[in-house]
Structures are given as C-alpha cells and as structure tokens.
Amino acid sequence: MRSSSCAQNGMRESNGFPQVLEVAPLNSLPYVGPLNGNSSMSGNKANETSEKTGPPAMIFLPSESAPEFYSLISQSKTGVALTGSAAMGKIGPTIGLVDIAESDDSYYFRVSLPGVSRDEKEFSCEIEPDGKILIKGATTTGEKTVCKHNQVFKMLSQNLCPPGHFTISFQLPGPVSNEDFSGNFGADGVLEGVVKKLYYED
C-alpha cells in the first residue's frame, strides 16, 4: 500500500523510504543545481561530519506528510518545507516565501500567503519553544469556475495557486518564548509575526 501511494505522488522508493528528487523550484531563489551527484539522503555518518555551508534552502515535497518528511525538516536549521498545494507549483506563484529577521530580544518573520483563507477554522500558525514555526491552511484560488454576484464565471487564465490544503514549516535561529507572540495576517496575503527570544538563566 505504501508503494502505491509513493507511485501516485511521483516518488520512487529506495530502501523503504521515498527517494527525494532534486528539482528546481518554479518561483524561488535562482537554481544553482544539485549539491553533488549523489541524491541519496542516506549515510547519516557522512551528514553528521559534513560542514554546513551555503544559503538557506527550500524543500518542495508534493506528497502527504510523513515521519520521514519531519525527520528531514528537523535536520535543517535554515530550510523551508512546503507540502500539498503549496509545493505543487503547477500554476501561479508558489506560496510560502519566508523572510526572517532578528533584533536584540525578538525574531521577526513574514510569509507570503497569496490566496490563502484567513478563516480561523482553516488557518493556524503554531510556534514551538525550539523556534519551529508550523503554518497550516488552505488556498482558495485556482478554481476553474468562480460564482460571484449571482453569475458563474469560467476561468480563461489561471495564474494563482491551486486550491487545497498545505503546510509550511521553518525554523527560527534560536529558542523562543512561544507564549510571547504577536502576529498579523493582512489582507495583502502576508503573515507577519514577532516572537521574543528565550534566554536561559545560568
């Protein structure tokens, strides 16, 4: 059953785990090619001793969430992970572009979420004490027909994100006081958040 779901998502299995395909994102930072000729994520000893270099990375996985996915994300301190319609990138701009900044006592982040429902029943932003941010929501654009003003409109062009649920996960540079958070999801489709840094007393 596992292999059929992986095959439907366009991923090949290797040693019981889906093989990650190295592809260029449609709307992101300029593509510089694969890191090396070996796309396998195995060899934990080599990964543990390797030096971390290079700019932050984005990971696009158009499959359902799985323990392997969260394991991959937990190993990245500066990466961004997208699932569901956020990762598809088939039409329109990819959602989930992230900016992170810091001051002396806080972290600031903003996330591009065009076409995402701001309804509290469909949208959530969770902040964990270790600085992990998990955003869940649903896009409302990209449909083939639109019913507005007692009329039915058939789309002639589709340049916005496809409809569907998504998750976005990224890591702030350090631990935070997740109870001390203020955020705003504006009509411009940008989620902004400020969270206090957590300092441990010696």
Image (cartoon, rainbow, N blue to C red):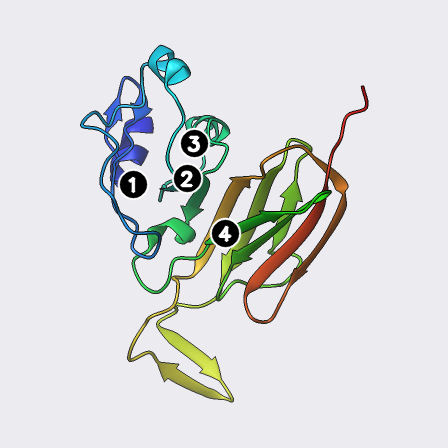
Alpha carbon distance from label 2 to label 3: 9 Å
Q: Amino acid at mark 2?
A: Glu
Q: Which residue is mark 1?
A: 9
Q: Amino acid at mark 3?
A: Phe
Mark drawn on residue 64: 2
Point out the tag, 2 or 4, that comes first from the N-terminus.
2
Residue 161 in view here = yes
Q: Which residue is mark 4?
A: 98
Alpha carbon distance from label 3 to label 4: 19 Å
Q: Is residue 82 above or below residue 163?
A: above
Name the quadrant of the C terminus.
top right
Q: Are marks 1 and 2 in contact (CB under 8 Å)?
A: yes
Image coordinates of residue 174 in percent, x first then y, are 63, 33
Which residue appears at 62% of the width and 57% of the height? 192
Outermost residue, left direction?
37
Q: Which residue is mark 3?
A: 69
Q: Nearer the viewer, residue 136 or 198?
A: 198
Point out the tag, 1 or 3, that comes first from the N-terminus.
1
Alpha carbon distance from label 4 to label 1: 25 Å
Name the quadrant of the N terminus.
top left
Point out the tag, 3 or 4, that comes first from the N-terminus.
3
Q: Nearer the viewer, residue 99 or 187?
A: 99
Point out the tag, 1 or 2, that comes first from the N-terminus.
1
Q: Are marks 2 and 4 in contact (CB under 8 Å)?
A: no
Image coordinates of residue 92 in percent, x first then y, are 34, 65
Considering the numbered disc 2 on the image, is that residue within a helix, a strand or a loop? Answer: loop
